Amino acid sequence: MPASRYAMLLAPFKMGLVGGQRAMTPLAAVSIAAARGQLPVGKGVLRWLANPVVAAGTLALAIGEMAGDKQKTAPDRVVPIGLAARFTTSAIAGAALASPKQRWLGAAIGGVTAVIASYPGWRGRMAALGRYGQTKTGFAEDAAVLAGAIGVVRGRASA
């Protein structure tokens, strides 16, 4: 595979890292970028994600997830439903960020990376909770997740 094809698969991998920490952020970031015309829509998954209603819905879900994450009753990200959500949303985002000929590979990379990245992210958060608390660690994680998602989308848009 030429180097440019590998480069096109970095975006799904990086977005999978983001998805390991917040399930809805990858989908929201890709959907908003597509709706704004920052990603080439073409055919397939990005055409659906570019719909302004879908972009608004994914953004609302991402905001809700970030708000819910600060609650003491929030489930751990490594519970089965959380891992399934991370896999699914990151796979969709990974497919959208990959080249048209590599959509399935982009989906697999995004989804699998999100599941794997969930565990060290969860361990790091648990280690920091005792010292900094639920809210502070959540906001710090949100900042890293948002910066990462924006960076991935901007990098892909300029590719």
Image: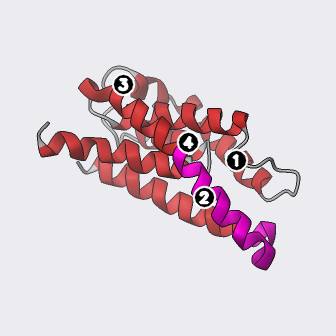
Residue at 73 percent across and 41 percent down: it is 79
The image shows residue 8 at horizontal and vertical percentages of 26, 42
Asked if marks 2 and 1 touch (Cβ < 8 Å), the reply is yes
State how far apart marks 3 and 2 are (Cα): 25 Å
Q: Which stretch is magenta?
A: 115-136
The tag earlier along the polypeptide, 4 or 3, is: 3
Residue 138 seen: no
Indicate which disc residue 115 carries. Answer: 4
Secondary-structure class at tag 2: helix
Identify the mark at residue 77; answer none if there is no mark.
1
Q: Mark 2 points at which residue?
A: 121
Kindly report the secondary structure that dominates the magenta region of the rendered protein.
Answer: helix
Under mark 1, the amino acid is Arg
Q: Distance between the residues labelled 4 and 1?
A: 9 Å
- For the residues labelled 4 and 2, the Cα–Cα distance comes to 10 Å
Amino acid type assigned to the residue bearing label 3 in the image: Trp
Q: Earlier in the sequence, mark 3 or mark 2?
A: 3
Q: Which residue is denoted by mark 3 in the rendering?
A: 104
Proximity of marks 3 and 1: CB atoms separated by less than 8 Å: no
